[in-house]
């Protein structure tokens, strides 16, 4: 029987602080997209369109489910258009090509 060691990624953190981690490129690039988080990011981006009237969001879930990380990623996209998002977009593209295109378009327009 072969024994294998499972290690925690060096970038793993049990919680995210949006204020302190907002500009942390390393955290953004280490993001592992989940379908639930991608839906949240897409919903936030869609709510920035001029034709949308309902922009308020309530995000609920159990501790440790990634709510703060999803919001941090979305805010980084919305407010850091000069940051290199190629690694992030590449990861998102594997799961949701339309969202990846939407992010690229949003960044290039702002």
Image (cartoon, rainbow, N blue to C red):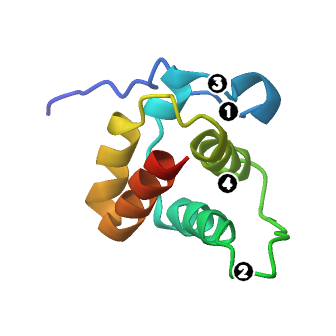
Residue matched to label 1: 14
Between circles 2 and 1, the one closer to the viewer is 2
Q: Residue at x 78, y 51 (%)?
A: 63
Evaluate if marks 2 and 1 touch, with contact meaning CB atoms under 8 Å apart: no
Instruction: Residue 105: give x, y in percent of width and height.
Output: 42, 57
Q: Residue at x 85, y 70 (%)?
A: 56
Evaluate if marks 3 and 1 touch, with contact meaning CB atoms under 8 Å apart: no
Helix, strand or loop for disc 2: loop
Which one is earlier in the sequence, the residue at label 3 or at label 1? 1
Instruction: Residue 25: give x, y in percent of width and height.
Output: 52, 23
Residue 57 visible (yes or no)? yes
Q: What is the spatial separation of the Cα atoms under label 4 and label 2, in whole angstroms?
A: 28 Å
Between circles 4 and 3, the one closer to the viewer is 3
Residue matched to label 3: 23
Q: How would you rate the neighbour count of disc 3 (Cα within 10 Å): few for under 14, some for 14-19, many for 20 or more?
A: some
Q: How would you rate the neighbour count of disc 1 (Cα within 10 Å): few for under 14, some for 14-19, many for 20 or more?
A: few
Q: How would you rate the neighbour count of disc 4 (Cα within 10 Å): few for under 14, some for 14-19, many for 20 or more?
A: some
Q: Residue at x 69, y 74 (%)?
A: 50
Evaluate if marks 4 and 1 touch, with contact meaning CB atoms under 8 Å apart: no
The label number, if any, that marks residue 65 in the structure image = 4
Q: What is the spatial separation of the Cα atoms under label 4 and label 3, in whole angstroms?
A: 21 Å
Which one is earlier in the sequence, the residue at label 4 or at label 3? 3
Residue matched to label 2: 52
Foreground pick, 12 / 20: 20
């Amino acid at each position: 029987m072969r024994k294998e060691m499972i290690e925690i990624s060096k970038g793993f953190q049990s919680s995210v602080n949006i204020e302190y981690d907002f500009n942390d490129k390393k955290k953004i690039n280490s993001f592992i997209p989940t379908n639930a988080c991608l839906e949240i990011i897409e919903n936030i981006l869609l709510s920035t369109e001029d034709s949308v009237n309902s922009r308020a969001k309530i995000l609920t879930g159990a501790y440790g489910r990634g709510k703060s990380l999803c919001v941090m990623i979305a805010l980084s996209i919305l407010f850091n258009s000069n940051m290199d998002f190629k690694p992030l977009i590449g990861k998102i593209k594997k799961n949701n090509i339309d969202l990846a295109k939407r992010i690229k378009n949003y960044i290039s327009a702002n």
